[in-house]
Amino acid sequence: METCIIKSPLGFTKITGDLDGIASVTVLNSEEKITDIIPEVLEDCVLQLNQYFEGSRKQFSLKLNPKGTDFQNRVWNTLQTIPHGKTTSYLQLSKQLGDVKAIRAVANANGKNPLWIVIPCHRVIGSDGSLTGYAGGLHRKKWLIEHESPYKQQSLF
């Protein structure tokens, strides 16, 4: 398994993967040494993340290899269908998966998503429109939703 650390607008980001695909993309809450030479199997992921943060990429096209249960993988696959610039609720997501009573399990699987940004768990909000739990911190979730919004807030001053 290859690893690299890059700097993003939201902090240091650790990427792991191998020839089978990208296994994880994780935002870190500490300062880390940026990787000097990106392993070849991670180069495309680094490129696509940089394009995303620059605003030129709206969809990722990477070979993914997250480790999870069958249910978690179903949730993560469904998360990838949420369009860029849109949000959904945990309730809508559980309905889409066919079991409205699975809302807590869906939320739990969402929270265990190992592929930050690439599998867009930040696009899931509360039914009332509130920003609810996010492993990377609510300030990052807010930033990501605003970054993807087609409506940019203009400064008044």
Image (tube, rainbow, N blue to C red):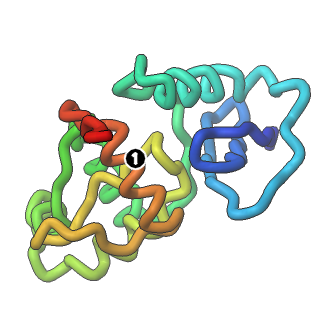
Across and down, in percent, residue 66 comes to 54, 50
* The quarter of the displayed image where residue 35 is located: top right
Q: Quadrant of the C terminus?
A: top left
Relative vertical location of residue 84 with respect to residue 144 in this rendering, above or below: above
Across and down, in percent, residue 8 comes to 63, 39
Across and down, in percent, residue 75 comes to 31, 58
Q: Residue at x 52, y 38 (%)?
A: 64
Relative vertical location of residue 69 with respect to residue 48 in this rendering, above or below: below
Q: Answer left or right for 125 relative to 51.
A: left
Relative vertical location of residue 94 with respect to residue 36 in this rendering, above or below: below
Element carrying mark 1: helix
Instruction: Give the residue type that dot 1 points to.
Output: Leu
Q: Residue at x 64, y 34 (%)?
A: 20
Label 1 Cα crowd, 10 Å radius (few <14 / some 14-19 / many 20+):
some
Q: Answer left or right for 135 relative to 27.
A: left
Front-lying residue, 69 or 126: 126
Q: How many marks?
A: 1
Residue under circle 1? 144
